[in-house]
Image (spheres, rainbow, N blue to C red):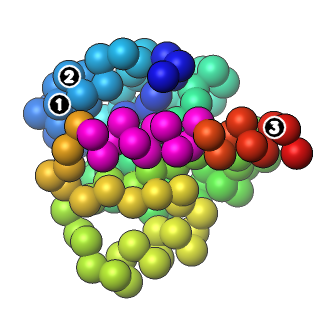
Amino acid sequence: MKRRKILVVDDSTLLHRMYDFMLGGHDIVHAVDGVDALEKLAADPALEIVFLDINMPRLDGLEVLKMIKADPKTRGLPVIMVSTHGEEHDTKRALALGADGYVRKPFRQDAIAQLIGTLSLAALTRAAE
């Protein structure tokens, strides 16, 4: 699998350590909340995938998702929503706002790797069209 530059947005230090372990073959950029995420996205156009927690201080993940998808510079960036909420309406809301996937905490390393692989394949398919 190709090495990716991934933005991980979560207010939990423990989750950031888990991402570092699970995504060890990728370059990880960390953001602690939605405001920090938007600043990192603006500063680094090389980011390829975003793992975005929903419940965070200052600016929640759904608001960040709306802003990412509304900005022409980041609109095509794959965003995976991550949350302890796993109800069908939560998933539908995130997908309706433009999320490319939804993962419920706690998650497994193989599920995350599969998502990254799926997103990479989808990007290659779009590029070939």
Q: Do the residues labelled 3 and 2 touch (CB within 8 Å)?
A: no
Q: Mark 3 points at which residue?
A: 127
Q: Name the residue under label 1.
A: 18
Q: How far apart are marks 1 and 2 (CA)?
A: 5 Å
Badge nearest the viewer, 3 or 2? 3
Q: Are marks 1 and 2 in contact (CB under 8 Å)?
A: yes
Name the disc covering residue 129, or none.
none
Q: Is residue 27 left or right of residue 103?
A: right
- Amino acid type shown at disc 1: Met
Q: Position of residue 92 (x, y in %)?
A: 46, 78
Q: In this view, does 107 lie to the left or right of 91?
A: left
Q: Where is residue 21 in the image (x, y as percent from the top left)?
A: 20, 22
- Residue 115 position (above or below residue 113): below
- Amino acid type shown at disc 2: Phe
Q: Is residue 108 left or right of residue 62?
A: left
- Which quadrant is home to the C terminus? top right
The furthest residue to the right: 129
In this orientation, does residue 85 appear? yes
Q: How far apart are marks 3 and 1 (CA)?
A: 31 Å
Q: Give the range drawn in magenta.
A: 110-120
Q: Mark 2 points at which residue?
A: 21
Circle 2 — which element? helix
Which of 18 and 45 lies nearest the eye of the viewer?
18
The furthest residue to the left: 14
> Which SS does the magenta portion mostly show?
helix
